[in-house]
Image: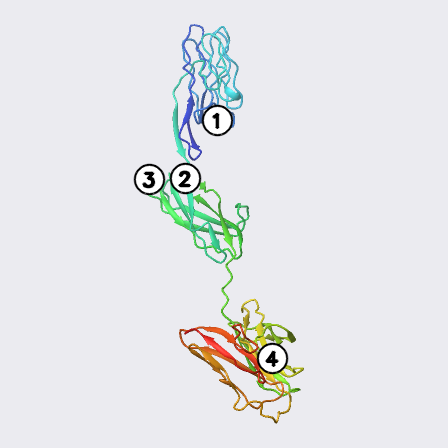
Amino acid sequence: MQGTFNLPAGTTTLSVLVGGQGGAGGAGGGGGGGSFVWPGSGAASNATLLLAAGGGGGASPFSAGQDAVTSQSGEAGGSGFATAGPGGTAGAGGGGGGTDGLDGGGGGAFGRGGGGGSFNAGVNQTNLVGVGTGNGSVTIVATVAASITTTLSASTVTAGTPVTDTASISGGTPNAADAVTFSWFTNGACAAPAAATQAVSVTLSASGAGTATSGPNTPATAGAYAYQAALSGSDTGMSPCEPVTATAPAPAPMLPSSITTALSTSTPALGAVVTDTATVSGAEPLSGTVGFTLYSGATCSGTVVGAASMPVTGTTTATATWSVTPPQPGAYSILASYSGDAVNPAATAACQVFTVGSGGLSLAALRSGGLSIGVSGCGTTTPRALPGVFEFGAVSVVTALPCAGHVFLGWTGGPCAGTTTNPCAIPDATPGPITANFSP
């Protein structure tokens, strides 16, 4: 038997079943045994047989059966004292030889290839068991398929990042036409059709090894993608499917926004309009709102007297204006803030304080020279004293200022006594003493 065939990639073991030589006999030679080749060391099956060659039929007296041939058909049986039957063929094996030794070889395993007859009764060839006789010569030329493996530049990338694939070939036969075709899929299972293909020439060494690298392919959005490489030329082979996972890019960090405010007046008369103008700046065009809140008192907290919201859009710097008429004399404060948007973060302005007078002056000097604010420890206040002549209901906003490295500890006397409220809104008519306390 003689044949040439390709082996599946990774094959390391071949099983060969060879029929024995047909023996010579006085009444007629035995048929040649069938021969079979399959990968692996286990039992063969009809699906795994790589070659099934028929044995020669029985010959004339005293002559051996003939070899199997690459046509995979048994030779016709020779003539003895009676007509010999034919040997088995690739499609259907012949029956076993007759008991009188005058008939041809038997059938093959799985109905493929000839079995061996003998001078005695012929027996059909069975899997892994060589029976019967015939010429046992076997010549095998096996070509193992080239191996191709691939390596991704990265299996997980951020969408928008290019990905390449490198194919490594071994066991190939050098040929000028050798090439690797890289296929790029927009699914993770290499399901056709490919979104893009690229053929890259590859030069194999004498040992049949070589590499080729694809050009880049870029996943446009988050999702599943895949590469697969195919070898062509004197060898063929296909790499496994290599999935690529693309993740969504992280959002760009927001740059700081800012908001500043300016009052039209800090000492309006009762019934006068006070206007607060907010200026917002962002890294990108603005698309949020500015909120204004009017509080009773000088701390931008507590009782809310009024509020409003104004949109700011279109540019990286915008202004919003809110006008309000406080209902009665006293201290008030306005807090303005920007809501933020998709690209610009929220921001809050400094608290703005103003005092509404009664609309008329008291002609009586309530205290000579005003009321000085006392200081304990290292620090000062602004202003340093409450006025001696003031409008009815007027309030002074006093801020405690500690020396460098010192701490404001709180107030003694006045409306903020026992607290660290700073600044403190103090009605001008408040009796003393009032002291700002600082660390020594």
Query: Which colour assignment does the render follow?
Result: rainbow
Which badge, 1 or 4, is on the more N-terminal residue?
A: 1
Q: Quadrant of the N terminus?
A: top left
* Mark 1 crowdedness (10 Å alpha carbons): few <14, some 14-19, many ≥20: some
Which badge, 2 or 3, is on the more N-terminal residue?
A: 2
Q: Nearer the viewer, residue 204 or 343?
A: 343
The answer for how far apart the CA atoms under marks 1 and 4 are is: 98 Å
Q: Nearer the viewer, residue 136 or 333?
A: 333
* Mark 2 crowdedness (10 Å alpha carbons): few <14, some 14-19, many ≥20: many
Circle 2: residue type: Ser
Where is residue 386? Give x, y as percent.
53, 86
Q: Residue furthest bottom?
A: 363
The residue tagged 3 is: 207
The answer for how far apart the CA atoms under marks 4 and 3 are is: 90 Å
The residue tagged 4 is: 332
Which badge, 1 or 2, is on the more N-terminal residue?
A: 1
The residue tagged 2 is: 147
Circle 4: residue type: Tyr
